[in-house]
Amino acid sequence: MVISLIDTHAHLDMREFDSDRLGVICRAKEAGVERIISIGIDLLSSEAAINLSESNEGIFATVGIHPHNAKEAYKRDMSKLEKLASHPCVVAIGEIGLDYHYQLVDKQSQIRLLNWQLELAERLNLPIVLHCREAEEDLLPILTNWCAGGKKKDSKPLGVIHCFSGDLEIARKYIGMGFFISLGAYIGYPSARHLHKSIRQIPLDKLLVETDCPFLPPQKYRGSRNEPAFVKITLQALADITGNTQKNIAQRTTANAYQLFKLEVMD
C-alpha cells in the first residue's frame, strides 16, 4: 500500500539533481509523495523553484534568502523577492532564519535580513520556513516580537521550524507561537537518539516531515544524495520512535502541510 506524503522541504533546483531531476520527481510520485515544496535560498534558487513548480504538477515553491547569503543581500533584493513572492505557485517565504554554527556571516547582517523577510511575509500574508542553528537565543525573542503584531492574533499557523533538533522546551515555545515542527531522516541517525524522548512528546498535529534533499540522507544512504522519495524512510523512523502507525503519522502530517501551505486537496 502506498501512503500519501508531502516532502515539505526539498532543494530540487540544486546541481545535485541536474542529471536526473525528472527521474527524481517520478520516483517521488511512485513512492507516494504527492506534493513537494521546493525551497529557495537566494534570488536565483527562488526563481528556479518557481520555474520547477510551473512545469511540474504537485511541486510548489518558497522564496527567500538563507542566512548564509545575508552578506550579499541588499534592500533592492527585497523588492525582487516581493515580486517573486507574488507568483501563484509560491506558498511561503523561506528558507529564512539564523545560523551561527559556521559564523559565515555576522549576526547583525543575519538579523537585519531576517527582519526584512518577516516583514515581507506579514505584508503578503504568507507563512515562513525557518532555519535555526545554534541561534535560538536571538531567534526566539525576534519571533516573539513578530508574533506580537496584530496579524498574529488569529489561529492560522505562522510557519515551520525545519530540521528541528532542539529540546522539548524549545519545541513547545515554537508551537506556542504558532509554528509546526519539521523532522527529517536525521532522526534515525545514531547520533540523534537523544532527540527521541522529545520527539515522542510533540503532538502529531504539530509535526511535518521533510527530506532537506540533497542533504541529510537516511542512515542507510549516508554519503549519498538524499531525494524526496526517501521521506517515507523518515515516516518509518517516526513510527519506530513514537510507536504510532505509519498510516496515522502520514495522514496527520500531510493534513498539517495542506493547512500550513494552503494547498488544495488532491482528488
Image: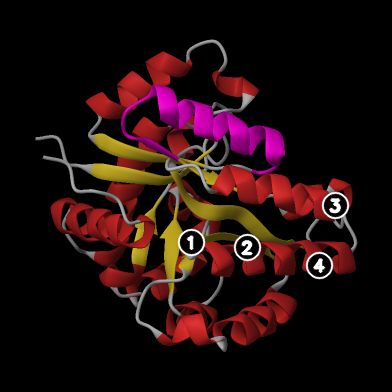
Q: Name the residue under label 1.
A: 126
Mark carried by residue 120: 2
Q: Of the residues under marks 1 and 3, which one precedes in the sequence?
A: 3
Q: Of the residues under marks 4 and 1, which one precedes in the sequence?
A: 4
Element class at badge 2: helix
Q: Name the residue under label 3.
A: 74
Q: Measured along the vertical axis of the image, is residue 125 above or below residue 79? A: below
Q: Which of marks 4 and 3 is in front?
A: 3
Q: How far apart are marks 4 and 3 (CA)?
A: 10 Å
Q: Name the residue under label 4.
A: 112
42 with respect to 261 (left or right): right
Q: How far apart are marks 1 and 2 (CA)?
A: 8 Å
Q: Return the x and y of residue 102 as percentages of the image width and height.
A: 83, 54
Q: How crowded is mark 2: few (under 14 residues within 10 Å), some or many (20 or more)?
A: many
Residue at image x 19%, y 63%? 244
Element class at badge 1: loop
Q: Of the residues under marks 1 and 2, which one precedes in the sequence?
A: 2
Q: Residues within 10 Å of mark 1 (few under 14, many from 20)?
A: many
